[in-house]
Image: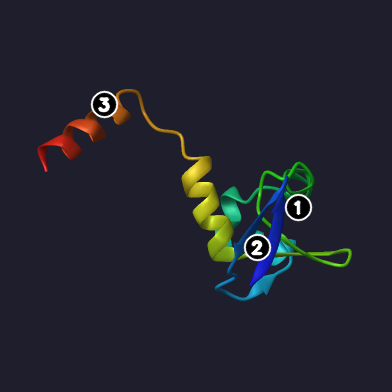
Amino acid sequence: MAALRLGMKEVRITVTGKLVNAQGLLNELFSEECRPSLRWLRTQTKAKAIPCVRIGRLVFFDVEMVRAYLAERRLVHARGWRAKAEILKAES
C-alpha cells in the first residue's frame, strides 16, 4: 500500500499487480504497431498525467492502475454518447 499526499489529505493507494518499468508498461498496454514513444511516457509521467510509483529516483508503474486511469480519464466518447448512456440508465 502506498500513501499519496494531496494538499492536507493523505490518500492510500493499493498496488494490485507487479510493478514494471516504463518500457514494460508500454509493452503491456500497447501493441507494437500503435505504441507511443518512451519519451511520450516520460513526459506524461513528469506532468503527473499518468500514475506512477517512485522509489527513490526510480519510477515504476502498476499496469492495471494505469490501464484503469487511462480508461477513466482519457477515453474520448462519440457525440451523443452521454445522452444515450443516460437514457439507457433511466430505462433500467
x and y percentages locating residue 29 in the rendered image: 56, 59
Instruction: Give the numbered dot on residue 69.
Output: none
Residue type highlighted by circle 3: Ala
Q: Secondary structure at mark 3?
A: helix
Cα–Cα gap, marks 3 and 2: 34 Å
Query: Residue drawn at (47%, 40%), measured in percent from left and top?
Result: 75
Residue that lies at the very extreme toward the front in this rendered image: 8
Q: Which of pointers 3 and 2 lies earlier in the amino acid sequence?
A: 2
Q: Which of pointers 1 and 2 lies earlier in the amino acid sequence?
A: 2
Query: Residue drawn at (68%, 68%), measured in percent from left and top?
Result: 2
Residue type highlighted by circle 1: Leu
Residue position marked by numbered label 1 in the rendering: 38
Residue position marked by numbered label 3 in the rendering: 83
Residue position marked by numbered label 2 in the rendering: 25
Q: Is residue 82 left or right of residue 21?
A: left
Q: Is residue 23 left or right of residue 64?
A: right
Residue type highlighted by circle 2: Leu
Q: Which of pointers 1 and 3 lies earlier in the amino acid sequence?
A: 1
Check contact, mark 1 vs mark 3: CB within 8 A.
Answer: no
Residue 62 occupies quadrant: bottom right
